[in-house]
Structure formats: C-alpha cells, structure tokens
Amino acid sequence: MDELLELLKDINPDVDYETEDQLIDGKVFDSFSIITLISNISETFDIELGPQYLIPENFNSAKAMWAMIQHIQEDE
C-alpha cells in the first residue's frame, strides 16, 4: 500500500489519500492524472489493468485501488 500512496502523492501531493474516497467522482483527478496513474500502477506492480478494471469504483480511493491491485495479483 505504501508504494501506491507514493504513486498517488506524485500525481497530487495535496490530497489526503488515507481518507479521500471521491478521487474520480469528486473530480480530484483529471483525465491526464488517471492515465498517468493507470500506467504507473501497471508498471510498479507488474500487472495488466484490463478494461474490466477501468471503472470509477476502482479508482475513487486508495483503498479501492489497493483492493483491485491485490485482486489482479491473485488472479495472475
């Protein structure tokens, strides 16, 4: 989870990722931030984020992203 938090802080250091749960729905991230985040998650965790994972619910919070990452790693 620490690695993910570092990736998120690189994108926007002013957000409290421990509590924020509206990163997408609340428009905290713009489209460029989302693309950067997807790329960085794929590279850092050596996973492929298929289209089935690219839904707002998976990116609204750090906890949701971490759960998605763990799920993908378990399936691979």
Image: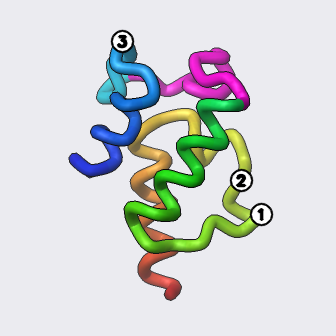
Q: Using the rendered view, name the quadrant where residue 35 is placed.
A: top right
How are the residues colored? rainbow
Q: Residue at x 44, y 57 (%)?
A: 67
Residue type at mark 1? Pro
Rendered position, 50 above or below 12: below
Give the label, 3 or 2, closer to the camera.
Answer: 3
Q: Earlier in the sequence, mark 3 or mark 2?
A: 3
Q: Earlier in the sequence, mark 1 or mark 3?
A: 3
Q: Secondary structure at mark 1?
A: helix
Question: Whole-Å distance between the Cαs marked 3 and 2?
Answer: 24 Å
Q: Is residue 62 left or right of residue 58?
A: left
Which stretch is magenta? Answer: 20-31
Residue position marked by numbered label 1 in the rendering: 51
Residue position marked by numbered label 3 in the rendering: 14
Q: Secondary structure at mark 2?
A: loop
Rendered position, 69 above or below 48: above
Residue type at mark 2? Leu
Q: Residue at x 34, y 47 (%)?
A: 4
Q: Using the rendered view, name the quadrant where residue 45 is placed.
A: bottom left
- Residue 54, label in figure: 2
Question: Whole-Å distance between the Cαs marked 1 and 3?
Answer: 29 Å
Rendered position, 65 above or below 28: below
The image shows residue 43 at horizontal and vertical percentages of: 46, 63
- Which residue is most to the left? 2
Determine crowd level at label 2: few under 14, some 14-19, many 20+ residues with C-alpha closer than 10 A: few
Question: Whole-Å distance between the Cαs marked 2 and 1?
Answer: 5 Å
Determine crowd level at label 1: few under 14, some 14-19, many 20+ residues with C-alpha closer than 10 A: few
